[in-house]
């Protein structure tokens, strides 16, 4: 029975004191209200932020945490970022992650702010009563399908319940 279980991963990273705390939650259904598992890791001496090249900072954090997870059960990964940064398919974090996973695992990007030259590769999703959309992008999966998956996630607010939980867990202080 466990072999039939499909898993979705969602990642977020929080930066502080030249460190990065990356958290990943796993779940099996878009309607889930609780994660199945929560993974966490802190990396020190991370790359500096480089405008237009955010992936250089965050991708190593995600890859490091992915090494602790059995990828054979993973159907899809959500990142708190974009897949493409513009209408000319300039790769963002999601595209670089897709490439690093040998283009085998679909990626959905869920960003909270948009880029003005990114229209064709993004769907604007209004959830709940929010006037501000989430910006959905995707690779390895149809963009409209990705949009509907995020739209169908549990929760009455702009951020789906599990993605809000992920954001909260990422910013929690470690007891070290």
Image: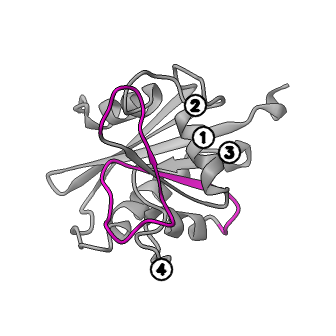
Residue that carries the numbered disc 3 in the rendered image = 74
Badge 2 density bin: few <14, some 14–19, many ≥20, Cα 10 Å: some
Q: Which mark is residue 88?
A: 4
Sequence-wise, the earlier of marks 1 and 3 is: 3
Residue 122: within the magenta? yes
Image location (x, y in percent) of residue 110: 44, 48
153 or 59: which is nearer to us? 153
Badge 1 density bin: few <14, some 14–19, many ≥20, Cα 10 Å: some
Sequence-wise, the earlier of marks 4 and 1 is: 4
Q: Nearer the viewer, mark 4 or mark 3?
A: 4
CA distance separating discs 1 and 2? 6 Å
Picture residue at 58% right of the left edge, 64% below the top: 98
Residue 157: within the magenta? no
Picture residue at 22% right of the left edge, 67% below the top: 49
Magenta region: 102-131
Is 161 on the left or on the right of 115, as rendered? right
Q: Which mark is residue 152?
A: 2
- Where disc 1 sits, the SS reads helix
- Where disc 4 sits, the SS reads loop
Badge 4 density bin: few <14, some 14–19, many ≥20, Cα 10 Å: few
Disc tally is 4
Examine the residues drawn in magenta and state their main secondary structure: loop
CA distance separating discs 4 and 3? 29 Å
Q: Nearer the viewer, mark 3 or mark 2?
A: 2
Residues marked 1 and 3 touching at CB (< 8 Å): no
- Where disc 3 sits, the SS reads strand
Image location (x, y in percent) of residue 104: 71, 62
CA distance separating discs 2 and 4? 29 Å
Image location (x, y in percent) of residue 132: 30, 41
Residue that carries the numbered disc 1 in the rendered image = 148
């Amino acid at each position: 029975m466990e072999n039939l279980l499909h898993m979705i991963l969602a990642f977020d990273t929080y930066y502080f004191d030249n460190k990065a705390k990356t958290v990943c939650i796993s779940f099996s259904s878009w309607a889930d209200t609780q994660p199945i598992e929560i993974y966490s890791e802190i990396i020190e001496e991370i790359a500096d932020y480089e405008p237009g090249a955010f992936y250089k900072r965050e991708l190593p954090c995600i890859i490091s945490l992915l090494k602790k997870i059995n990828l054979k059960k993973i159907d899809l990964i959500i990142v708190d970022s974009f897949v493409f940064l513009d209408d000319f398919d300039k790769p963002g974090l999601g595209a670089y992650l897709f490439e690093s996973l040998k283009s085998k695992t679909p990626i959905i990007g869920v960003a909270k702010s948009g880029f003005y030259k990114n229209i064709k590769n993004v769907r604007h999703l209004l959830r709940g009563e929010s006037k501000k959309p989430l910006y959905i992008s995707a690779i390895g999966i149809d963009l409209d399908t990705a949009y509907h998956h995020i739209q169908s996630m549990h929760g009455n607010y702009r951020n789906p319940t599990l993605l809000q939980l992920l954001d909260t867990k990422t910013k929690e202080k470690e007891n070290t």
